[in-house]
Structures are given as structure tokens and as C-alpha cells.
Image: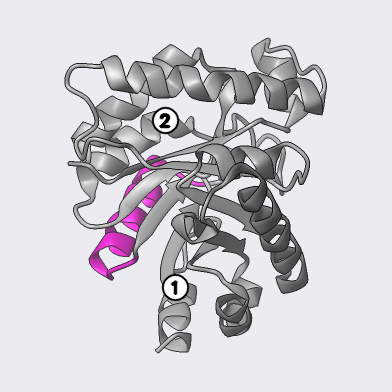
Amino acid sequence: MKIGAQLHPQATSVKELRDAWRACDDMGIDSIWTWDHFYPLYGDPDAAHFEGYTLLSAMAADTKRAQIGMLVTCFTYRNPQLLADMARTIDHISDGRFVLGLGSGWFERDYDEYGYEFGTAIGRLRALEAGIPVIKDRLAKLNPGPVNGKMPIMIGGRGEKVTLRLVAEHADLYNTFGPPEHFRQKLDVLEEWCAKVGRNPAEIEKTVCVGVDEIDKLADYAAIGADHVIVMLGGPFDLKALEKAKKSLG
């Protein structure tokens, strides 16, 4: 099972983030991610915070081995044509290690303070559904295209009626959260959707975000069907949890 790290860009500095993702890459972590928000999600709501896609450009240049990406992009923050071009450019900076993570968005403060229309959950999902083909079409038109020809797409979320259908139809990776019983339920629903749309679920890499307090449950996630576990880390970044995760999986 792969092990990744999500580095939270809040209550930290760019130097600390760069030191952390370089260390993750040096220790052989399989993937490194950040998040697509404009304000902290926990703790001091007005703590220091940095924009994710700009950080990904630096991450792409600073690292050499790990896959990198946004866990996950809030689709409605950017025009889909522009998003595709941004993703392609970061993919080239990383020499083909970029994963385009997509989601419908949920953090209302981001929308309110940056002037985006929050709307409804189903409205944001419908926008994502309409936008995925636009992204794919633009990626196919860009010159040059993605380094490896096809850019892997991750879709993250918990919704069983729309999100998991979109995963079955479009995604190379699916991401959700624990606990293990929640993860099992989502994979069961994903298999149902794959059967309906004629997709082999084995083609989709299953990833799960876990807290540092869940490291002792990694074997449980693996038994359920996780291919890739991503440990969520806030600053100051203590990477001992990643070492523990690697040891727990042998």
C-alpha cells in the first residue's frame, strides 16, 4: 500500500512547507499533497495561510520522486480551461508526477470572502460534472500535453448519488476519509456504480485520508481495499507519523 502526506498550508510558513515536502520526498513517501482553501480549516481561523496551487508549483520544482497534487481542487474556484492549463504546466515542472485532484467544494468562508457564489451542494456537484469533460478536452488540446500523455484524475468526496458515480465514470483515483467502516461503505457503493457504468473497479486506485491517530488502523484499511493511505499533517510538521506508517506496513 502506498503512503502519502497531506501538508496543511495553515499556521506555518513557506519555508516550513518546503522543508517538509523535501523531507517527505527524501524519505521515499509515495505522494505529497496540500489543500485548496484560502483560510484555516481548524484552530485559529485567522492564522497564517497560503494558496495551494502556487505552493504546488514550488513543490513540483523542489521534489523528484513523489506524486504531487491537490487533495482536492475546489472545481468552482477556477475556470475549467484555466485549471487544465495550470495542471498541465505543474505536471511539466514535476516531470510527469502531477495528479489532478477534483472536488465540488464545501468551505463556505472561502466562497464568501473571495466572492464566489456558494449556491447549493447539488449545484456545485452539477458544475463539477459539467466541467470534467471540459478539462479533459482542454488537456487533449494543449501543446505540449501532459508529460505521460494522460494526466491521472482523482475525485474526492463522500456523496453516493453523484460523486461516486462521477468517480466510476471519470476517475483514476478515488479519495475519501475514515473510519474504516465509512471507507468500506463508500467502496461498496463505488463497486455498484462501476457495475452500472461498465467500469472495472480495480482500475480505480482507492485512497483514504487518515489522521496521525489512525496509524495503527492502516492494516484495517488495507484489508478493506485501500491502495494508498494519505496521512494528514499540520504544522509544525512532525514526520515521525510517516515513518511509523511505513513501519506498520512492513
**Residue segment shown in magenta:** 12-29
Element at badge 1?
A: helix
Q: How far apart are the two marked residues, 2 and 1, measured between alpha carbons?
A: 24 Å
Residue 125, percent from left and from top: 70, 27
Nearest to the observer: residue 141 or residue 76: 141
The local crowd at label 1, few if under 14, some if 14 to 19, many if 20 or more residues have their Cα within 10 Å, is many
State left or right for residue 112 relative to residue 136: right
Residue 123, quarter of picture? top right
* Residue 10 can be seen, yes or no: no
209 up-or-down from 198: above or below: below
Q: Which residue is mark 1?
A: 242
Residue drawn at 33 percent across, 22 percent down:
139
The residue under the point 54% across, 57% down is 201
- Given the image, on which type of amino acid does mark 2 rest? Tyr
Is residue 209 located in the magenta-colored stretch of the structure? no
Q: Position of residue 195 (x, y in %)?
A: 64, 52
Residue 210, given in percent of the width and then of the height, sits at 61, 65
220, 162: nearer the viewer: 162
What is the quadrant of the N terminus in the image?
A: bottom left
Label 2 environment density (alpha carbons within 10 Å; few <14, some 14–19, many ≥20): many
Above or below residue 142? Residue 214 is below
Camera-side residue: 20 or 93? Answer: 93
Q: Mark 2 = which residue?
A: 53
